[in-house]
Amino acid sequence: MNARLDEVWQAIDPTRLRRTLLQMLDIYSPSGKEEDIQLYLEEVLSRAGFRVERQEVERERYNLRVTMGSGAPALYLVGHVDTVPAWDLEEFGAREEENLIRGLGSADMKGGCAAMVEAWLAISDALGPEERPSLGLLLVVGEEENGDGSAAFLQQCHPPWVVIGEPTGLAPCFAHYGYLEAGFVTRGLRRHSSLPELGHNAVESMLRLLLHLGKAPLFDRERGEIVYSIRELSSSRAGFVVPDRCEAWIDLHLPPGMDPAALQGAIRGIAAEAERFIPGLDMEVSFDFASPGYDLGDDSRPARLVEEIYTRLGRTPRLSAFRSHSDGNLFHGAGTRPIILGPGSLESAHTADEQVPFHEVAEAARIYAALALGMG
């Protein structure tokens, strides 16, 4: 691998990589509206001489899949091209500041996608068709919503390994948190707002319920293992009245070994205890989505290969567990082993100041290329 890897690394073009990333950032591609960016990426890959397959997810929404080498790829590089909606439609695009590239999706995960495309182009530039590894590149839609792009791919293909370029600061994650989405509804009695004593305020019940949940040892942020965030809180909007309905959604990220079903039971039990402290509580609990985490361990060929690559780059691999939710859970549930590894950090993802250091994007391209040669 060493001689070929040197050739491929030399073929990585920082100017081309920067141009690809900046153009991707200037294309608005929130979940459900990914066609424009897929058309751009399809053109880039087709221009390099590859036949790009469109994998339909729904009307005007499709994944892009391309392969090289012979046989079914043992490894796919996987990136999602969709983003969360823009905070400001006037300022969603790319902005450069020294080594930082800012813009919607720069960390999550257009930086990773651009690095994967550059690794792919460098391999094809440096190596003849017969020298290229057996490798797949998959650019999916819908990750920021329900993962329907990856789900569509997994209906047809189950590669042994994938590398997903979510933002990890280039820390290789062979473990992944699970995810649970919990919904709570409280109901009250509507009355004129000037006569609250005659009604029952569903918002007050919800606030007391959430405070009760937050006091449970299970949700202790300092000593507990669960990461939770109250994502949404809304009530009925009916004018000058005591609200009779309130709804809340909570995101919960679970350490790899925790069973989401067991956590659901624990949450139901804690919520039920609230009836002792909240007068007239009328409550409903539901769980719309659950996905277990996983831990692939550090005794595998890819783990040893990562250590070798990082040593060669002068880096120390900090094996970690990916703390967010991603398509990695879907792939693992389907029998594929996912490594989460990409430029940028979760700290800036989904914020108005999203950013990625360009040197990390370039380094990610080298890492992806080396993994492709070592595993393909």
Image (cartoon, rainbow, N blue to C red):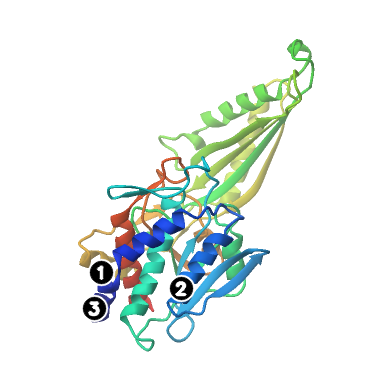
Residue that numbered label 3 is attached to: 2
Asked whether residue 326 is in view, the answer is yes
Asked which secondary structure carries label 2, the reply is helix
Kind of residue at disc 1: Glu
Q: Position of residue 158 (x, y in %)?
A: 54, 74
Foreground disc of the pair 3, 2: 2
Return the disc, 3 or 1, that comes first in the chain's sequence.
3
* 2 vs 1, front mark: 2
Q: Is residue 201 above or below residue 9?
A: above
Mark 3 or mark 2: which comes first in sequence? Answer: 3
In this image, 198 relative to 84: left or right?
right
Q: Quadrant of residue 202?
A: top right
Q: Quadrant of residue 312?
A: bottom left
Give the x, y percent position of residue 350. Answer: 48, 44
Q: Position of residue 1 (x, y in %)?
A: 27, 80
Q: Is residue 232 above or below residue 262?
A: above
Q: Amino acid at mark 3?
A: Asn
Image quadrant where one finds the C terminus: bottom left
Q: Nearer the viewer, residue 359 or 273?
A: 359
The residues bearing labels 3 and 1 have C-alpha atoms spaced at a distance of 11 Å
Mark 3 and mark 2: Cα distance apart in space = 26 Å
Mark 2 lies on residue: 45
